[in-house]
């Protein structure tokens, strides 16, 4: 079943963050559209909500789009924007309120990369846009 989520506050954003944890994408899949005040990320997300069996884990990925509206600016750190084919793994999304409801949405990637979005307020949408396929492995995190 295709997932569609909307985030309008930091609690909603934490739910979106959980659903996109371990999503993979290419640097070229990041797009900032200043005139539209929109930032778009096309990704292949790991479907954490898929049911697994007792003896077999169900590993699945889906192509998804995450976009943020009311974006005033975007900055990157530790991401080689001149390498559009470089693969990134999204770990989490967080929000730092500066002058509520405005603040910074931060997309945190493995390897130390980050994107900081200066937003008027939190307004994000996540939607699966393609079919699912079996993932060869399940993401693993060390404690």
Image: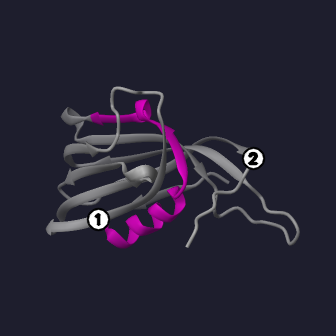
Residue at image position (29%, 36%) is 32
* Vertical side of 95 occupied by 143: above or below: below
Left or right: 4 in relation to 136: left
Q: Nearer the viewer, residue 112 or 40?
A: 112
Question: Is 108 situated left or right of 99 in this image?
Answer: right
Mark earlier in primary sequence (2, 1): 1
Q: Report the front residue among 72 and 25.
A: 25
Numbered label attached to residue 95: 1
Would you say residue 23 sits in the magenta stretch? yes
Instruction: Please tell me in which quadrant of the rendered image residue 31 appears.
Output: top left
SS for dot 1: strand
Dot 2: few (<14), some (14–19), or many (≥20) neighbours within 10 Å? Answer: few
Q: Pointers 2 and 1 in contact (CB under 8 A)? A: no
Q: How is the image coloured?
A: one colour
Residue at the disc numbered 2 = 136
Question: Where residue 1 sits in the image (x, y, percent)?
Answer: 68, 54
Residue nearer the viewer, 87 or 129:
87
Residue 48 point in image, percent of width and height = 63, 62
Please give left or right for residue 92 compared with residue 45 in the image. Answer: left
**Gap between marks 2 and 1, in whole Å?**
32 Å
Q: Residue at x 72, y 47 (%)?
A: 135
Q: Which residues, given as a range, are shown in magenta?
A: 9-32
Residue 115 highlighted magenta (yes or no): no
Of all residues shown, which one is farthest toward the left? 99
Image coords of residue 46 (percent x, y):
62, 53
């Amino acid at each position: 079943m295709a997932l569609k989520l909307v985030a309008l506050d930091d609690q909603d954003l934490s739910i979106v963050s959980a659903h996109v944890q371990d999503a993979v994408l290419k640097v070229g899949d990041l797009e900032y559209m200043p005139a539209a005040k929109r930032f778009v990320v096309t990704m292949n997300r790991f479907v954490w909500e898929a049911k697994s069996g007792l003896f077999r884990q169900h590993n699945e990925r889906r192509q998804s789009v995450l976009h943020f509206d009311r974006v005033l600016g975007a900055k990157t750190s530790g991401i080689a924007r001149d390498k559009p084919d470089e693969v990134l793994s999204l770990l989490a999304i967080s929000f730092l309120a500066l002058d509520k409801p405005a603040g910074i949405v931060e997309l945190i990637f493995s390897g130390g990369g980050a994107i900081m979005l200066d937003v008027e307020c939190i307004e994000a949408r996540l939607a699966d846009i393609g079919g699912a396929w079996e993932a060869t492995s399940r993401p693993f995190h060390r404690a």
